[in-house]
């Protein structure tokens, strides 16, 4: 029996080594023709025997995944496989995979309720203003309807964005602003511009799950820092800088996703001081700016766009269909970003930019935002009360916005609750989707704008066994 157990253990070790190599190849950390670590080195770094590595390499060679070259070692064979994001990390339960949560929210039809999604219901958007904007756009000249936009994007919209950002203390001239297709594209371009595969990037823990997915696509080393009600834990932030030497820190400084917390001025100053000392660049995603009743501190305002890049879009307050985002950055980076934008997207969406400009200039947009803030405030209170009746408690009560970061009763795992709720056509967002350290297993994020239907609470109660 002991011999059989030892044999089974050896098989598992060989499989583990093989999976490690496969993941590196699937994630393009090992390109075709790249040399694998020597048998001795691989054994030492992974804590297995050399015979285990020999057998794993021999089996991978038999599959054609790697090649043996006499006297030289082992090399990756074949052509580059299509990038598989799901293979870049161990396959976890799909309910706590950030890509799968996104796909649930995007692919399910109207029969599903989506308190776990990250956007407002269509009925909450300024439908009348959008229709007026579309009618005006239909009467625009030929170039607006059929031509490419200039690389920086529509000048009148950049001028308007410059004025809007100044209301939050961020001074950015129109020539420091580049329009993008979305906030996500803005982050993607900046990651292409600023980091290489293997570079360390800091994120909050918890953080927006698509930050994790996007950084995984860029093959970055994602390092997390615990988030507090006033921002990241500064002492642990400093320790992460010293240990990992990250190139970037990606965050929401106002109305943090998923917690709804707000960065304090003291924490902001300390973060910027640490960034200056370590050469860190900060990407500040300000997509929820218009939800605020009173503007919170912006890192870009304190920094003057020196080490901070400011990002935003209008998908949360105006339309997720008319995609338009922007980057505000230091002038000496703009030229490089323009080249990168042209090489990857050629030009921006002129129609979306014209539409956004028209709606923002419409006097009804500010009224829409005022109404939206009040509506969200009421929904926050109503959702908190309904969740409290089930024993689900907010981590904090946010000052504004649409997210509640909530702790489930003791003994409940959010992933299991989400799986059971999905069978009842309810899409939830379990906490470990947002956590690099996987330390939020009993948390969930609720979108209060999507949480009015009583069926959500009945299904949640059943999924929780209440």
Image (spheres, rainbow, N blue to C red):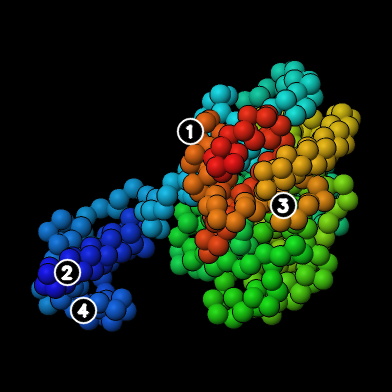
- Do callouts 1 and 3 mark residues in contact (Cβ within 8 Å)? no
Marks 2 and 3, how far apart at CA: 48 Å
Query: Residue 84: percent from the left, percent from the top?
Result: 37, 49
The residue under label 2 is 5
The residue under label 3 is 394
Disc on the earlier residue, 1 or 2: 2
Q: Is residue 385 above or below residue 243?
A: above
Disc on the earlier residue, 1 or 3: 3
The residue under label 4 is 49
Quadrant of the rendered image containing residue 377: top right
- Do callouts 2 and 3 mark residues in contact (Cβ within 8 Å)? no
Please rate how many residues cluster around mark 4, counting C-alpha atoms within 10 Å: few if below 14, some from 14 to 19, many from 20: some
Is disc 3 placed on a helix, strand or loop?
A: strand
> From where the camera sits, is residue 197 visible?
yes
Tag nearer the camera, 4 or 2:
2
The residue under label 1 is 423
Quadrant of the rendered image containing residue 368: top right
> From where the camera sits, is residue 376 visible?
no
- Do callouts 3 and 4 mark residues in contact (Cβ within 8 Å)? no
Find residue 66 and name its label: none
Question: Is 213 left, or right, of 394 in this rendering?
Answer: left
Q: Is residue 440 above or below residue 125?
A: below
Tag nearer the camera, 1 or 4:
1
Marks 1 and 4, how far apart at CA: 45 Å
User: Which residue is nearer to you in this view: 353 or 444?
Assistant: 444
Disc on the earlier residue, 1 or 4: 4
Disc on the earlier residue, 3 or 4: 4
Residue under the image location 64 percent in, 47 percent down: 445
């Amino acid at each position: 029996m002991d011999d059989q157990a030892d044999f089974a253990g050896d098989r598992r070790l060989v499989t583990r080594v093989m999976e490690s190599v496969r993941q590196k190849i699937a994630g393009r950390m090992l390109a075709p023709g790249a040399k694998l670590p020597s048998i001795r080195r691989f054994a030492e770094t992974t804590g297995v025997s050399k015979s285990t590595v020999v057998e794993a390499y021999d089996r991978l060679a038999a599959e054609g995944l790697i090649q043996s070259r006499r006297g030289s070692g082992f090399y990756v064979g074949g052509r580059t496989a299509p990038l598989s994001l799901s293979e870049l990390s161990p396959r976890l339960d799909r309910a706590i995979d950030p890509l799968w949560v996104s796909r649930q929210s995007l692919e399910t039809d109207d029969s599903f309720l989506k308190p776990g999604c990250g956007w407002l219901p269509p009925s909450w958007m300024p439908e009348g203003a959008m229709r007026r904007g579309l009618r005006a756009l239909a009467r625009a000249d030929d170039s607006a309807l059929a031509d490419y936009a200039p690389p920086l994007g529509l000048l009148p919209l950049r001028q308007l964005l410059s004025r809007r950002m100044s209301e939050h203390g961020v001074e950015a001239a129109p020539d420091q602003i580049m329009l993008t297709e979305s906030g996500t594209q803005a982050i993607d371009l900046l990651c292409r511009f600023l980091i290489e595969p293997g570079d360390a990037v800091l994120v909050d823990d918890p953080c927006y799950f698509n930050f994790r997915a996007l950084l995984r696509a860029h093959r970055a080393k994602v390092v997390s820092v615990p988030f507090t009600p006033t921002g990241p834990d500064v002492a642990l932030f400093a320790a992460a800088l010293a240990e990992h030497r990250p190139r970037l820190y990606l965050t929401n400084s106002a109305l943090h996703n998923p917690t709804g917390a707000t960065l304090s001025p003291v924490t902001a100053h300390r973060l910027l001081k640490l960034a200056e000392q370590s050469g860190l660049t900060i990407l500040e995603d300000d997509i929820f700016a218009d939800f605020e009743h009173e503007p919170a501190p912006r890192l870009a305002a304190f920094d003057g766009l020196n080490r901070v890049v400011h990002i935003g879009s209008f998908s949360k307050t105006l339309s997720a269909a008319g995609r338009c985002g922007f980057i505000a950055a230091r002038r000496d980076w703009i030229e490089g970003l323009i080249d990168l934008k042209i090489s990857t997207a050629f030009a921006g969406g002129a129609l979306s930019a014209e539409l956004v400009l028209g709606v923002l200039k419409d006097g009804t947009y500010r009224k829409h935002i005022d109404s939206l803030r009040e509506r969200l405030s009421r929904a926050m209170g109503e959702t908190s009360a309904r969740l409290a009746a089930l024993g689900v408690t907010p981590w904090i009560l946010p000052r504004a916005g649409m997210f509640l970061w909530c702790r489930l009763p003791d003994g409940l795992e959010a992933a299991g609750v989400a799986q059971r709720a999905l069978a009842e056509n309810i899409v939830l967002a379990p906490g470990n989707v947002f956590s690099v350290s996987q330390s939020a297993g009993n948390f969930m994020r609720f979108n209060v704008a999507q949480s009015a239907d009583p069926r959500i609470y009945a299904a949640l109660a059943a999924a929780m066994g209440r």
